[in-house]
Amino acid sequence: MSEKLETSKTTGAHSQLSRLVGEWEGTAKVWFDPSKLEDESPVRGTMKPILDGRFILHEYRGSFKGKPITGMAIYGYHLELEKFQCAWVDSFHNGSAIMFSEGQRGGKDLSVLGGYAYVTPEMEQHWGWRTNIEVISDEEVVITAYNITPEGQESKATETTYKRVNKSAE
């Protein structure tokens, strides 16, 4: 796998992931109802390569309505399955759950689909969560996540617009 990984790190999906490396700051927006912006607040993040560039670790700090939020995600690309993958945790959205997500086989975009359970004493529902990472330029990244109802309706849930502060986050 090392030759395949080295090729991916120079011209493939891992090269695409490496564009995320750096220190970032920007704005995070949250919607619960698609017609009403619930919160907009500053966010800072660091993305650094881990395990010899196999993965990118994204750590961030922000807030929701003045209360602090922290989180982290690990982004990677599974060479054999040809899929982007992600494991995400945070102190606001996920509770005590880890969300695992992956893209479509052969997908060239940094887009992954996962899901979460919405549980009350009366019911348990399973919702989808699609995350897109768009590298606008070497200086700007937009991470947008969409809630997907059990019936399949999709609406924007979060949007983080990052501007680069520092390229090196090694």
Image (cartoon, helix red, strand yellow):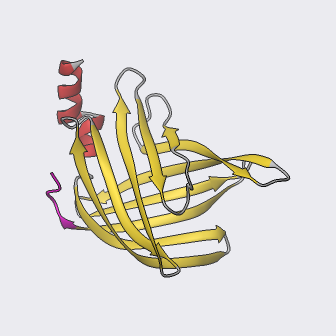
Q: Is residue 25 rendered to the left or right of residue 82?
A: left
Q: Indicate whether 9 appears above or below 110.
A: above
Seen from this angle, which residue lies furthest right?
Answer: 122
Kindly identify the residue that appears in the image at 33 percent across and 67 percent down: 162
Residue 41 seen in the figure = yes
Residue 151 seen in the figure = no
Kindly identify the residue that appears in the image at 47 percent across and 28 percent down: 105
Q: Indicate whether 28 appears above or below 129.
A: below
**Was residue 169 drawn as part of the magenta stretch in this picture?**
yes
Kindly identify the residue that appears in the image at 17 percent across and 56 percent down: 169
Q: Indicate whether 62 appears above or below 141.
A: below
Kindly identify the residue that appears in the image at 35 percent across and 62 percent down: 60
Residue 69 appears at what percent x and percent y? 45, 68
Question: Range of the magenta residues?
Answer: 165-170
Quadrant of the drawing holding the N terminus? top left
Residue 136, located in which quarter of the rendered image?
bottom left
Q: Is residue 111 rendered to the left or right of residue 150?
A: left
Q: Nearer the viewer, residue 156 or 95?
A: 95
Q: Nearer the viewer, residue 103 or 75?
A: 75
Residue 146, located in which quarter of the rendered image?
bottom right
Seen from this angle, which residue lies furthest bottom?
Answer: 66
Residue 9 appears at what percent x and percent y? 20, 34
Task: Tell me the chief SS of the magenta region.
Answer: loop
Residue 156 appears at what percent x and percent y? 59, 62
Total numbered circles: 0
Q: Nearer the viewer, residue 82 or 120?
A: 120
Q: Is residue 98 rendered to the left or right of residue 164?
A: right
Residue 113 appears at what percent x and percent y? 55, 42
Residue 86, located in which quarter of the rendered image?
top left
Q: Nearer the viewer, residue 152 or 40?
A: 40
**Was residue 121 drawn as part of the magenta stretch in this picture?**
no
